[in-house]
Amino acid sequence: MFKSLIYLAGLVAVATALPARPSCPPPQHPIKYPYANTTLVTRQVTWTCRETSDYTAGDAEHEHGKGIFITNGDKVARGFYAYQNSCEYMPYKHIWIDAGETRFISFPDRWEGRIVRGDDETNLAGEPQTLATWVEFSLDAQGWIWGDVSLIRGCDGAVRLWATDGSKVERGFAKNILVGAPRSAYARKPNGACVLKHTENSDGSINTAVRDWELKHVGAAHAYVDDAHGNPVIASTNGRFGAHFYPGRP
């Protein structure tokens, strides 16, 4: 009996001495999707990708302004970066918002793109930065804004998106899904932040561990988890959305 106890104590000592396996792999270079980065035409409008991002402290909320009210639901100031579709190397504009504050960012007619969390060192470095929760949106010829929350390129925290035209439609989620996922579901941003990886690879194949985790804890009715499940797009007829970014890992 005494020998058995010594043996068990030895096993415990060895187990406690073993280093814990990391839950997140080392940082990797951004996945190279087929990007353009010059002049593009969308909806018969010609755009030129920005060489530098325009900083705004918040745009005017005039009566006919189109854009998004962004609320920083984190406990510290956060940066938010708006990328125009096919212009992946440099944001169109960016803003820093204090904890708990809301700011309005305006966009021109027919604009199409996304807003993500981030930081200046990473997102203004001139390299594609896709590993994040995307708030995708576009403005149509009528002045409506269309949008969704997408986890296809990654997830660095929860976001809720809603129409401000009185229709009360919303998408997204508030739950923290960054904790408890399978180890193969994680990836690191270039700045070291451990987040959920992309669900789709550049060749169209699916990372099933992270996709299935997000289907279970968010659902295809609330966000895009891949291109095969759901169509969680909403519209606001006044051209304005509200977006609440919950605490995350920029």
Image (cartoon, rainbow, N blue to C red):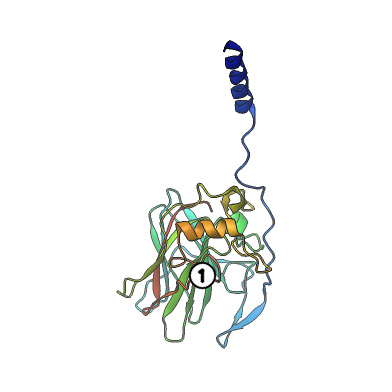
The amino acid type found where label 1 is placed reads His
Q: Which residue is at the far left? A: 166
Q: Residue at x 59, y 23 (%)?
A: 12
The part of the image, by quadrant, that contains residue 5 is top right
Left or right of 14 on screen, residue 167: left
Residue 178 point in image, percent of width and height: 51, 51
Residue 174 point in image, percent of width and height: 41, 57
Q: Is residue 96 at all visible to an observer of this figure?
A: no
The part of the image, by quadrant, that contains residue 39 is bottom right
Q: Residue at x 52, y 51 (%)?
A: 249
Residue 142 vertical placement versus 136 (above, below)? below
| Disc 1 secondary structure class | loop
Residue 104 point in image, percent of width and height: 41, 67
Q: Is residue 112 at all visible to an observer of this figure?
A: yes
Q: Which residue is at the far top? A: 2
Residue 207 vertical placement versus 8 (above, below)? below
Left or right of 46 on screen, residue 61: left
The part of the image, by quadrant, that contains residue 132 is bottom right
Residue 8 vertical placement versus 138 (above, below)? above
| Mark 1 lies on residue | 229
Task: Estimate how packed mark 1 is, as few (under 14), some (14 to 19) or many (20 or more) residues with alpha carbons within 10 Å.
Answer: few
Between 147 and 230, the one lying in front of the other is 230
Query: Which image quarter is the N terminus in?
Result: top right
Q: Residue at x 49, y 65 (%)?
A: 56
Q: Which residue is at the far bottom? A: 44
Q: How many marks?
A: 1
Between 240 and 62, the one lying in front of the other is 240
